[in-house]
Structures are given as C-alpha cells and as structure tokens.
Image (spheres, rainbow, N blue to C red):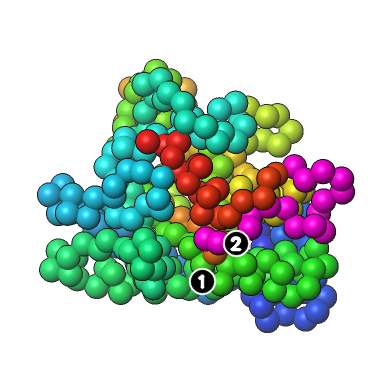
Amino acid sequence: MAFLKTLDLNTFCNGSIMERQQFAQSLKEGLREHGFVKLVNHGFSDDDINQLFNWNKRFFALGKEQKEKIMNFPNDNPQRGWSGVGIEKTSTLNPAGKTNLTRCSHKNLHDAKEHFDIGPSCDTQFPNQWPSEVDIPGFETWVTAYFDKSYQIALDLLGALEFAFDMPQGSFVKKCAGHASELRLNHYPAISTDTLEIGTTRRIWPHTDFGLITLLAQDDNGGLEIQDPNQPGEFLPVMRNHPSELVVNAGDCLERWTNGIIKAGLHQVTTPSHVKQKKGEMLPARHSVAFFLKAARGASVGPFEKFVDGVPLYEDMTALAYHKQRQGIVY
C-alpha cells in the first residue's frame, strides 16, 4: 500500500535549504501521522541489500550446534548472539496497543522467529558474539560495515527531526554519542496459515521498538503490518516496493523525548494480506534486518523541556534503565 510517505534522504544530505526543510517537515509529519515512513537514496544500493539478505540466509543456514556456540543469554541486558525460535516472547510488550513495563505471563503465546543481535564493535560492556570465521568467512566484517553505515543514516534522520522542530543542531544527536545501538537479523521460518489462524502463534506480536529510530530492510514475502492510526487495533500491510527501500519507524524513546508528540509505531508480522483467507497455505520463510538507533546508555530518555507544556508524560530515566524494563518482559 502507498499510504506511507517515501522520502529521499539525498535531498536532506545534499539538497538546498528548501529541500532540506521539505524533507525534515515530511519526516516529522510522516512519523506523527503513522509512526512510519519509507526511505530511499540513503546510501545502500540494491546490490548492498541483496548482499545483506544473502548474509542473513547464510547465517541462519548454519547448523544448530554452530549457532548454539554464540547463544544469547536470556535476561534484561542488550541481546548479543543467536536466539532460537520462540525464545523471545513479544506478546506482552504492548497488550491492547499500550506500552507495558511490567513482567507478566505470556499465556502460552508464541513467537515463530529466530534472530541474531549485535551492538557496536567497540562495546566492552555488552560485547558481541560472532560465529567462527571458519563457519561463515567475511560475515563479521560485512555486517559490521552495514551496522556502521546504518548508524550514520539514522543520525541523519535524527538531525532532520532537530531541523523540523527548530532545535539547536545536535540536541538529539549528541545524546547518541557513545551509542548503544543494535542490529538484528531476523529469520521467520516457513509456517502454515492454519498455525497462525489458531491465534496463539505469530511471527512477531504487536509491539513498539525500544529505541529512537528503526531502519528495517525486508524481503518480498510480506507479513509486516502497522497499526492504522485512524482505527486502533486494525493493521495495514506494508510491502516492499523497491529492493533497497528502508522502512523507518519511531521507537519508544523518541516518543518519550518528544513527550508523545511523535508516537512509537506499533507493528507486527503475521499472515500476508493476500493469503489471509486461504486455508492450509504454507508461507515461505521471511527475512528482515533491523537497525535500532539508541541513545547512549547513561543519557536521559525523559522528555525534552521544549516539548513539555505542564506535566511531563514520561518519567526521567536513563536509556539503559528503560531498555532493561522493556527487555525483561520478553523472557
């Protein structure tokens, strides 16, 4: 569907003052309207994204024994390494579309996905776990380069929002210095529509992302849906229209910084719209890669004073404290 704005990042990075203003306002409006926009001309070519998905598939094609060597330990820390199918449980992150900060029962609700997570290469507090170079040569080098470039793209978007809100340059961006951003490779194994129809399993349940801005590359197999802002609880499909386009969404901490002016985008991955009425259909495997821009761990994710008229809607806390509150819910 074409309801999301498609923005050209090159017009902000290399355009005239007027083009930069237009981009910044369109980004702000798109995120305020839907929590999402699409992004093109960001610096990744079609070939780059094709290679990204090749690496994604090669990683998840590794044997279970190879992946278990770098298994993520399930707790409230930032995830590092491989998490098997169903380990992470997202069903209670945003029940009824509301952000949850309290652990509660998952009620036998399941996620049908596995994932691999990394942070910055310089992170010594929560170091990365990489597969052996023998098992998948070149993987660490290529994925690290993709991470670093994604970080710069996300900072450009954050800078555009500073521009749109008439804030001093660096107001948002400087809070990401020494950042704690993350990259996730997702694999949703093939699954039948009948299994999803039962209602106790989703590829991923409705949720918002914990950070500031997410950059998502997705394949053509469909299933990503975002909440219709005009009909809460109803979801609209978001298909890929161009090989290198990125889906951009606002996360919880951007909502907090702006005191709710920009809302985090609620989304899920479920049965693609074109097969929802078909029984016994086997959905092919789905792959995606998400980069999560996050503030520095010690930075405040309470509202900026600029956005507060009266009482702040969100309490002041550090980015790491907020992450731990949310992360602890999925295990």
The location of residue 29, given as percent across then percent down, is 77, 54
The answer to whether one can see residue 285 in this image is no
**Does residue 162 lie above or below 56 as drawn?**
below
Above or below, 36 against 190 in this view is below
Q: Quadrant of residue 28?
A: bottom right
Looking at the figure, which quarter contains the N terminus? top right
- Counting from the top left corner in percent of width and height, residue 41 is at 58, 71
Q: Report the residue marked by disc 1.
A: 178
Please tell me the numbered disc located at residue 299.
2
Choose the circle earlier in sequence order: 1 or 2: 1
User: Farthest residue toward the top?
Assistant: 198
- Helix, strand or loop under label 1: loop
**Helix, strand or loop at disc 2?**
loop
Question: What range is drawn magenta here?
Answer: 297-313
Q: CA distance from mark 1 to mark 2?
A: 10 Å
Q: Residue at x 25, y 57 (%)?
A: 59
Image-quadrant location for residue 281: top left
Q: Is residue 42 left or right of residue 262?
A: left
